């Protein structure tokens, strides 16, 4: 009995050992397979993946116009695409210069481009239309061809174009502080209808402010070749410079396809000013008929602009030195003093007027002229009279003569008494 027990135990041990060895082998094989799967990636079959994208140049083409359809064929696969052929399908509204292209080979990760001339029919309707095309190729060294279908979009629209045809003001001369009506005339020179047109003046450091209301005008819709006007009442600032300003005008509208457009144009605003001269007689001396006198006059500018290159010429009726006097630039609220020597020979006593001709240029280099009179008085020659010094000298001489006579008389009396 004891021997049988030992025999059974030995057999079970051998079976257990055999089972353990098999399990260990299977577990090792499993780990080996997992190691191979994770460490060494499974080789995949090479393939070709062609995609087609396209844009039109220009982005929107008007009916009756031509452009180019730029197609990009990209191979995002891992195999060469060989003997690639591109075929563009006929289109009812677009004709193509060439519909078939041989693209040869496109390497993996590479792309190629084709520019296709096209013309849109004049009867084409607006909107986006699809252009269908096919790409045929051989995959790697394979002799069998593969064909894929694709499409790109082309936008057809009537071009919207606004033109500012005229800008006018109700005053030809615009000065600081003026209230002016500005009228902007526009025209739809495009071939499409414009909707919800808004014209606005953007007051970015401009020399004016609104005289009433806002600075926007809603004009609504404009058909092709239709005109519209937007008017604005503005006040020119007191500190506006005398120069031509460039005023931005913003045009906002929608085209027939519903796309919004915002455009900025510029118009001119000419702020002007005029010199206003005041000529005054400051003083006169020795103004006697038949003699030579002196006049001092001042020329002041009380206008709204500088008088540039100001030159004063004097009335040729009188013999005056100098004949002309160059003042130069005479700014607002400034003055210049001029001294003149005048001959009054042959000039009668009484009131007289001297014409001063002023020639100058305004801030826009326009030549202007003005004549300003200055009045003066010629006195008659005074009756002969002695000056104070002459009177003193004559009085002294008279005293001497009288004293001398008295002295001589006294001397004669003394001499007679001695005899």
Image (cartoon, rainbow, N blue to C red):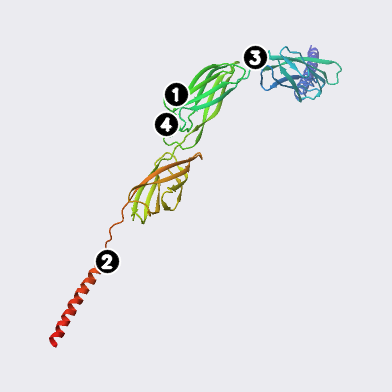
Q: Residue furthest bottom?
A: 419
Element at label 3: strand
Bin the neighbour count of mark 4 within 10 Å (Cα to Cα): few under 14, some 14-19, many 20 and up.
some
Mark 2 or 3, closer to the camera? 2
Residue behind mark 2: 390
Residue behind mark 1: 214
Please tell me how many numbered marks the rendered image carries: 4
- Relative to the observer, which residue lies in front, 9 or 18? 18
Q: Work out which quarter of the rendered image holds the C terminus and state it.
A: bottom left
Mark 1 or 2, closer to the camera? 2
Marks 3 and 1, the one that precedes in the sequence: 3
Bin the neighbour count of mark 2 within 10 Å (Cα to Cα): few under 14, some 14-19, many 20 and up.
few
Mark 2 vs mark 3, CA separation in Å: 113 Å
Marks 2 and 3, the one that precedes in the sequence: 3
Mark 3 vs mark 1, CA separation in Å: 36 Å
Element at label 4: loop
Label number found at residue 178:
4
Element at label 2: helix
Indicate the position of residue 393 as horizontal and vertical percent values. Answer: 26, 69
- Relative to the observer, which residue lies in front, 191 or 290? 290
Mark 1 vs mark 4, CA separation in Å: 18 Å
Residue behind mark 3: 127
Q: In the shown orientation, is residue 187 left or right of residue 383?
A: right
């Amino acid at each position: 009995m004891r021997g049988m027990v030992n025999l059974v135990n030995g057999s079970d041990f051998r079976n257990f050992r055999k089972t353990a060895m098999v399990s260990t082998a299977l577990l090792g094989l499993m780990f080996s397979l997992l190691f191979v799967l994770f460490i060494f990636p499974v080789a995949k079959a090479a393939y070709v993946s062609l995609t087609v994208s396209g844009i039109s140049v220009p982005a929107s083409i008007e009916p009756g116009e031509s452009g180019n359809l730029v197609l990009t064929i990209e191979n995002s696969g891992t195999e060469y695409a060989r003997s690639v052929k591109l075929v563009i399908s006929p289109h009812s509204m677009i004709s193509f210069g060439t519909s078939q292209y041989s693209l040869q080979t496109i390497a993996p990760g590479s792309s190629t481009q084709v520019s296709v001339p096209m013309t849109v029919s004049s009867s084409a309707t607006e909107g986006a239309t699809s252009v269908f095309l096919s790409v045929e190729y051989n995959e790697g060294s394979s002799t069998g061809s593969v064909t894929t279908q694709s499409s790109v979009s082309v936008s057809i629209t009537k071009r919207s174009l606004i033109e500012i045809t005229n800008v006018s003001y109700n005053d030809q001369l615009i000065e600081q502080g003026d209230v002016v009506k500005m009228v902007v005339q526009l025209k739809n020179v495009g071939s499409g209808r414009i909707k919800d047109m808004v014209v606005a003046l953007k007051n970015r450091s401009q020399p004016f402010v609104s005289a009433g209301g806002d600075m926007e005008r809603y004009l609504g819709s404009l058909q092709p070749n239709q005109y519209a006007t937007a008017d604005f009442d503005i006040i020119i600032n007191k500190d506006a410079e005398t120069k031509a300003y460039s005023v931005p005008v913003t045009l906002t509208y929608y085209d027939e396809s519903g796309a919004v457009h915002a455009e900025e144009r510029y118009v001119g605003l000419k702020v002007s000013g005029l010199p206003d001269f005041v000529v005054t007689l400051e003083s006169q001396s020795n103004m006697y008929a038949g003699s030579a006198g002196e006049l001092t006059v001042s020329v002041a500018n009380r206008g709204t602009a500088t008088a540039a290159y100001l030159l004063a010429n004097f009335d040729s009726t009188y013999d005056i030195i100098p004949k002309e006097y160059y003042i130069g630039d005479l700014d607002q609220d400034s003055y210049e003093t001029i001294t003149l020597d005048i001959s009054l020979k042959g000039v009668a006593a009484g009131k007289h007027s001297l014409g001063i001709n002023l020639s100058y240029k305004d801030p826009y280099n326009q030549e202007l002229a003005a004549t300003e009179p200055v009045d003066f008085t010629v006195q008659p020659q005074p009756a002969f009279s002695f000056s104070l010094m002459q009177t003193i000298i004559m009085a002294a001489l008279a005293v001497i003569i009288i004293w001398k006579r008295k002295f001589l008389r006294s001397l004669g009396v003394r001499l007679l008494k001695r005899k």
